[in-house]
Image: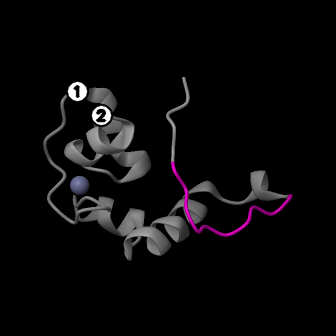
Amino acid sequence: MEPKRKLKGVHQMEPSWKRVNMSELMDSLAKDMFGRTRTGAITANECVECGGPATDFRDELSQKEYTISGLCQSCQDKVWG
Ligand SMILES: [Zn+2]
């Protein structure tokens, strides 16, 4: 099941978007949306959205999600709700 994501004010997708490096794409999205890059936040064990520590996760899935989205547990709860 695909989680619903609200993307506001992001760049229009290019026809060749599938060939774009996904982590670069998500970094630029995160930078636009949250003012910091996803990989930068993850490397620092910080949440890309709230900037808080991202060290406590409910389960392996949430931890894995963090490595993908850069969201801490509480922000994941807010986003995926
Ligand atoms: Zn957070």
Who's the residue at 23% across and 65% down the image? 44
| Residue 45 point in image, percent of width and height | 22, 58
Specify the segment rendered in magenta: 6-15
Who's the residue at 51% across and 45% down the image? 5
Circle 2: residue type: Ser
Q: Quadrant of ligand 1?
A: bottom left
| Residue 68 point in image, percent of width and height | 43, 47
- Magenta residue check for 49: no
- Place residue 11 in its image quadrant: bottom right
| Residue 77 point in image, percent of width and height | 27, 38
Q: Is residue 39 left or right of residue 2?
A: left
Who's the residue at 66% across and 59% down the image? 21
Farthest-out residue, top: 1
Asked whether mark 2 lies closer than 8 Å to ligand 1, one says no
Circle 1: residue type: Asp
| Residue 58 point in image, percent of width and height | 18, 30
